[in-house]
């Protein structure tokens, strides 16, 4: 009976064991119905050796392009520059890829066609965006406008390409400073580690070019603050969330939890939400 159950488990591989990947690996090791952690890919295996050996069922350590051979679902938890190297081999093999660095999808949109041609899937977790179900539902009808304002502590924005290229000094801010206003597509280029939530919002709604975005550096906040307003033919709604940063100040704690929730849905008997 035990062997039969194991053979029915979906195998999950994780690319990257930073603040997000390590939490997902731990959750899988502790037990998610119908799923098993089969493999990981990391830049420096020695750095993560003690963590991996502490798991009850230590996974294989493989190169990122081999994760699709060892798993049914590959979870991308790496810098957005690595997205293609992780997702392409997986979807070519007809696997599912869970994409955390969703902003990187905009520059690799052909991966969706590649997945479709090979029977693969690309799954984007809700992440920090409460109400994404409502946006998905509204998009079945007509959405007229989507606006989003993101405010982040200084540490969460340091090193963003937009700030570096425009030589903006945010270290000594005493009051909030609007850094950017424009489309979600342009925001993703300027702040690739900061606006994945905006890209997810745009893909669920009216697209990255029509979704309007503001990014603020705000020394008065300690959390990542998002405010969204949606006007549609079916409803008008607004939502706000204040995320507690993880060990990585660019990422909220809820991001890892959202991926875990998505993985639970893959084999859950009861599924809540669209």
Image (cartoon, rainbow, N blue to C red):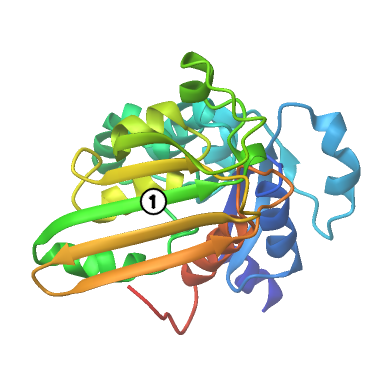
**Whether residue 93 is visible:** no
**Residue at the spot 24% in from the left edge and 36% down from the top edge:** 113
| Residue 142: percent from left, percent from top | 8, 62
Quadrant (top left/top right/bottom left/bottom right) for the C terminus: bottom left
Q: Nearer the viewer, residue 127 or 82?
A: 127
Q: Going by the picture, which residue comes out furthest to the bottom?
A: 270
In the image, taking residue 83 as reference, residue 234 lies left or right, namely: left
Number of callouts: 1
100 sits to left or right of 23:
left
**Nearest to the observer: residue 19 or residue 99:** 19
Q: Residue at x 45, y 35 (%)?
A: 87
Q: Nearer the viewer, residue 95 or 173?
A: 173
Q: Can you say whether 183 is above or below 143 in the image? A: above
Decide: is 76 above or below 205: above
Question: Which residue corresponds to mark 1?
Answer: 149
Image quadrant of residue 116?
A: top left
Residue occupying image coordinates x 39% and y 27%:
189
Instruction: Point out residue 147 in the picture as x, y percentages from the top left corner.
Output: 27, 53
């Amino acid at each position: 009976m035990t062997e039969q159950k194991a053979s029915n488990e979906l195998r999950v591989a994780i690319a990257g064991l930073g603040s997000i990947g390590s939490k997902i690996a731990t959750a899988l090791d502790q037990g998610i119905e119908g799923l098993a952690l089969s493999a990981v890919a990391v830049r420096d295996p020695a750095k993560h050796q003690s963590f991996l050996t502490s798991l009850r069922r230590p996974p294989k350590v493989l190169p990122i392009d081999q994760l699709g051979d060892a798993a049914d679902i590959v979870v991308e938890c790496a810098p957005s520059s690595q997205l293609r190297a992780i997702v392409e081999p997986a979807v070519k093999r007809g696997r599912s890829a869970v994409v955390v660095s969703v902003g990187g999808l905009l520059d690799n949109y052909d991966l969706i066609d590649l997945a479709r041609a090979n029977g693969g899937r690309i799954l984007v977790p809700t992440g920090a965006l409460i109400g994404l179900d409502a946006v998905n539902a509204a998009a079945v009808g007509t959405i007229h406008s989507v606006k989003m304002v993101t405010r982040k502590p200084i540490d969460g924005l340091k090193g963003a390409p937009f700030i570096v290229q425009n030589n903006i000094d945010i270290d000594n801010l005493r009051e909030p400073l609007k850094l950017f206003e424009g489309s979600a597509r342009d925001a993703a280029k300027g702040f690739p580690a900061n606006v994945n939530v905006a890209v997810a919002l745009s893909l669920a709604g009216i697209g990255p070019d029509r979704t309007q975005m503001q990014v603020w550096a705000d020394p008065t906040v300690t959390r990542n603050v998002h405010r969204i307003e949606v006007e549609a033919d079916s409803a008008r709604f607004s939502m706000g969330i204040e995320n507690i940063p993880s060990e990585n100040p660019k990422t909220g704690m809820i991001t890892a939890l959202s991926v875990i929730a998505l993985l639970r849905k893959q084999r859950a008997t009861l599924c809540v939400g669209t």
